[in-house]
Structures are given as C-alpha cells and as structure tokens.
C-alpha cells in the first residue's frame, strides 16, 4: 500500500449494504491497521450487520447508517461524518460471490460462521481475516446459524430445513425429521451400519441424470469418490469398499442435478 505524503490519522470505511459484503470487507481491516497503526479507523454500517464488526480489534468506532425509524436522513449523516474530520474515506463496493450471505454468528472474537444462498457456509478462526468454505450437504438457501460456544451448532433454511454439526464444521448432517431435502431422489442409510471394511449404499432416481456419490471424513475432506457419472432412473445399490480408510465416523453425500443429501456411517475395524 502506498504511503501518502501527509500522515493519515482518521479513516472511514463505508459498507452500508448486505451481510455478505461486510464479511468480504473484514480482511482489509488488519491490512489498514498494519499500514496505519496509530490511525483512528471507523466503519459506517447498517445496524443488522453490526454483530460482524462489534468487538473487532482493528476498528475504533462504528457509525450507524440507520436507526429504529429507518435510514438516517442524508443531511444528519453528512453532519456526523463531517464532525469526525476523517482524512480518508474508503467506499467498498459489493462482490456477488459473498453478497448473498444472510446470517453470521460469532462464538467469540475469533471464531465465526456465515451462511447464505445455495447452502453456502463459511467459517473463520481469526476474526474474519480469512474465511473457508465448508460442506453443508444441501443446495437450499440457509438463513441463520447458531453455535453454543463449542463445536455443536445448527443452521436453518428454506422449507423448514435444519442442518446440524457436532464438530464445528466439515460436513453437517441434515435433520430429516424437520426437512424434506431436494425432491426427485432418495438416499438410504447404508447397511450394515456400523460396518467393517465394506457396506452397501442404496439410492433411487426418478430420471436419468449425472450424480456424484462422495465420502467425507469428520473434517469435511473428500476421502473417497464412489460414483461420478450418469445413472439411469430407478434403484441403485453400490458396494462401498472402505478397506483403505481408518476407523471412524464418515459422511456420504449424494449430489444430483436436483440437489444433494448427506448421511453418516460408522466404520469399525
């Protein structure tokens, strides 16, 4: 970053749009702080995105673009900003990839999750400095997430969908008692389960389509690609050879053109 000839003492970052756009702005905060360690850094935000920023160690002050009555009148906001005597104002524009996030939850100042359209889930372990995408097991829109301060958490989405994780991330399991996942296909529980070395996975399709059947470990890493290609309509039985996998809990995910489903299985050797 270029250093100006006159020292920058007061910086305003303007991000008055959606949750996802505010999340996308977070990585620039430590960069600004490292370049201007003595500067007063403030952000202009909508109140409903405040949870993402409150307590952020790189920001000195927050200005709200709205209140209980709606948006703050332009003249009033202009006077507030002028009174602050900022040296630099940075207006950050939206980026579509993260613009469709609709829920963010931080367990503490470092650990947080964000969810949004098409089953997207991101996690950060450094206060928003970096975000890593996780497998959600669904293509439906997610609207909110909540964690109890530990690795156990939930996310809710369209049509009553509830997904659950017990390890803080990776592949999360779909609670099918409350949610009917993408229609047009079925994924059955593997048999036997628990199993030793091999098990049968059954699924059915209503039409010919391309599918993927993938196995993930507890950290959400792909460990085995079982099926990848076009399959005819009807019932299918697949023999899963897990002889190269270690004992533990795994998730298998069926991805189709109409959505996806996830189930868990236990390998005991």
Image (cartoon, rainbow, N blue to C red):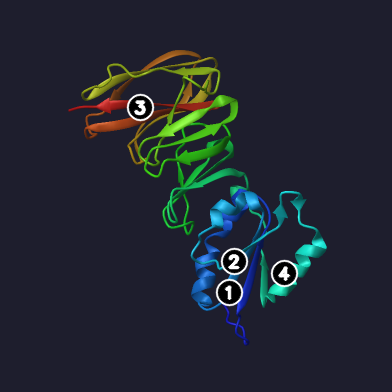
Of discs 1 and 3, which sits in the foreground? 1
Tell which of 251 and 79 is nearer to you: 79
Of discs 2 and 3, which sits in the foreground? 2
48 horizontally vs 119: left or right: right
- Label 4 SS: helix
Identify the residue position indicated by label 4 in the image. 81
Q: Position of residue 13 (x, y in %)?
A: 64, 66
Q: Residue at x 54, y 71 (%)?
A: 32
Residues under numbered marks 1 and 4 in contact, where contact means CB atoms less than 8 Å apart: no
Q: CA distance from mark 1 to mark 3?
A: 49 Å
Residues under numbered marks 4 and 3 in contact, where contact means CB atoms less than 8 Å apart: no
Kindly tell me whether residue 231 is visible in this rendering. Answer: yes
Identify the residue position indicated by label 2 in the image. 61
Q: CA distance from mark 1 to mark 4?
A: 13 Å
Q: Earlier in the sequence, mark 1 or mark 4?
A: 1
Local packing at callout 4 (Cα closer than 10 Å; few below 14, some 14-19, many 20+) is some
Identify the residue position indicated by label 3 in the image. 264
Residues under numbered marks 4 and 2 in contact, where contact means CB atoms less than 8 Å apart: no
Identify the residue position indicated by label 1 in the image. 40
């Amino acid at each position: 970053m270029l250093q100006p000839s006159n020292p920058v003492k007061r910086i305003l970052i303007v991000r008055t749009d959606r949750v996802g756009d505010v999340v996308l702005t977070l990585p620039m905060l430590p960069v600004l702080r490292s370049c201007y360690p003595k500067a007063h850094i403030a952000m202009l935000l909508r109140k409903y995105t405040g949870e993402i920023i409150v307590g952020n160690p790189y920001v000195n002050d927050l200005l709200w673009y709205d209140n209980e009555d709606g948006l703050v009148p332009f003249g009033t906001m202009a006077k507030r900003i002028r009174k602050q005597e900022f040296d630099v104002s940075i207006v950050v524009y939206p980026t579509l990839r993260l613009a469709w996030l609709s829920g963010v939850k931080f367990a503490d100042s470092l650990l947080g999750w964000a969810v949004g359209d098409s089953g997207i889930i991101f996690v950060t372990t450094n206060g928003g400095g970096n975000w890593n995408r996780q497998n959600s097991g669904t293509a439906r829109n997610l609207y909110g997430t909540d964690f109890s301060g530990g690795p156990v958490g939930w996310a809710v989405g369209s049509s009553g969908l509830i997904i659950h994780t017990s390890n803080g991330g990776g592949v999360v399991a779909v609670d099918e008692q409350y949610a009917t996942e993408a229609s047009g296909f079925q994924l059955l529980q593997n048999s036997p389960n628990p199993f030793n070395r091999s098990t049968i996975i059954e699924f059915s399709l209503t039409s010919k389509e391309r599918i993927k059947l993938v196995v993930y470990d507890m950290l959400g890493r792909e460990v085995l690609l079982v099926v990848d290609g076009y399959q005819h309509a009807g019932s299918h039985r697949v023999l899963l050879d897990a002889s190269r996998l270690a004992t533990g809990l795994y998730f298998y995910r069926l991805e189709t053109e109409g959505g996806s489903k996830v189930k868990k299985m236990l390998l005991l050797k």
